[in-house]
Amino acid sequence: MYPIDTQDGLFHDGNGINELGTVLPASWLNQVQAELIAILTAARIKPEKATQNQVITAIKMLIASSAPAAATADIAGVTKIIDSLNSNDKFSALSARQGKVLNDSKLDKDGTAKTADTASRLKTVRKINGVPFDGSMDINATPVGAVHYFAIDWAPTGWLKANGAAISRTAYANLFAALGTRFGAGDGKTTFNLPDLRGEFLRAWDDGRGIDAGRIFGTYQKDMFESHSHILPQFKNVNAGIVKPITTGAELSTVGIGRDISVSSSGGSETRPKNIALLACIKI
């Protein structure tokens, strides 16, 4: 196809006085027609006199047929952009907007964006080790059944007071699996008891060493004094004014004692070392 054969390559209208309109040679019109028919032929469209949009239809079809297919695991192709976080399509790309959502926020289970309290915390999406996490505490790997002491008078999330309470075997299934009925069988069916550490000192289990021989793990032990004795010597006066104990013979003497003696008992209701009271809790 070539441009119209005028001085400036453009079409002109005649003015009826001193300029004629551009003459359209049959060769030029035939070339225009051939170009248009070639487009229809390439799209496999038969020219129709009554249809006025065949060229644009053919162009669209040619563009569509030349576009690469959708990408697959084995064949490179066009990748669709999705603007959703709940799609399972493994061959689509995430939109920039949703990428920003991921960068700026974290996600709840349903794909709703949530803001985390800190980088080390999570929004509630599931129970971890049987305990619901809501982002208000740090996740840790403390095993079920661990006993810790706290300088607060309430049990933190994920812990229960070690107060001997009877609790549900199903609601606290992980803890029941660890403790069983070692510290009490509860009602014998649906509950079990926690260890009661209130007001008690702990003693490490002997575990075959022989210092606390025969002790069963987790059992309670009452207080005890080790058996012992005290010596109360007798004294007598000698000529040099020296006081010494009588160790032999049957001699009896009476001497003065330089301080008061009381036969009444002293002390409290128990034997204990210096201590501080903290809250004992068990991990659930």
Image (cartoon, rainbow, N blue to C red):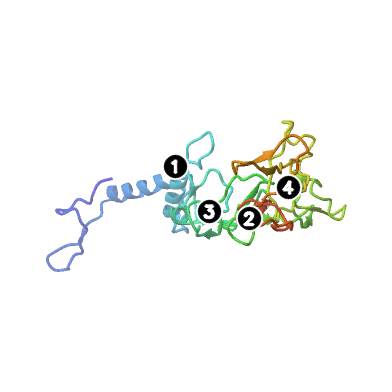
- Mark sitting earlier along the chain (2/1): 1
Pointer 3: what residue?
121
What kind of residue is marked 2? Arg
Q: CA distance from mark 2 to mark 4?
A: 63 Å
Q: Nearer the viewer, mark 2 or mark 1?
A: 2
Q: Say which residue appears at 70% left-offset and 56% top-offset.
A: 198
Task: Name the amino acid, label 4.
Answer: Asn
Instruction: Please tell me how crowded label 2 is: few (under 14), some (14-19), or many (20+) other residues with Cα within 10 Å.
Output: few
Check disc 3 and give the amino acid type: Arg
Residue 66 badge: 1
- For the residues labelled 3 and 1, the Cα–Cα distance comes to 50 Å
Residue located beneath label 2 in the image: 259
Mark 4 against mark 3, which lies toward the viewer? 4
Apparent side of residue 18 relative to residue 144 in the rendered image (left or right): left
Image side of residue 234 versus residue 105, left or right: right
Q: Earlier in the sequence, mark 3 or mark 2?
A: 3
Q: Nearer the viewer, mark 1 or mark 4?
A: 4
Residues at circles 3 and 1 in contact by the CB criterion of under 8 Å: no
Residue denoted by label 4: 174
Q: CA distance from mark 4 to mark 3?
A: 23 Å
Q: Earlier in the sequence, mark 3 or mark 1?
A: 1
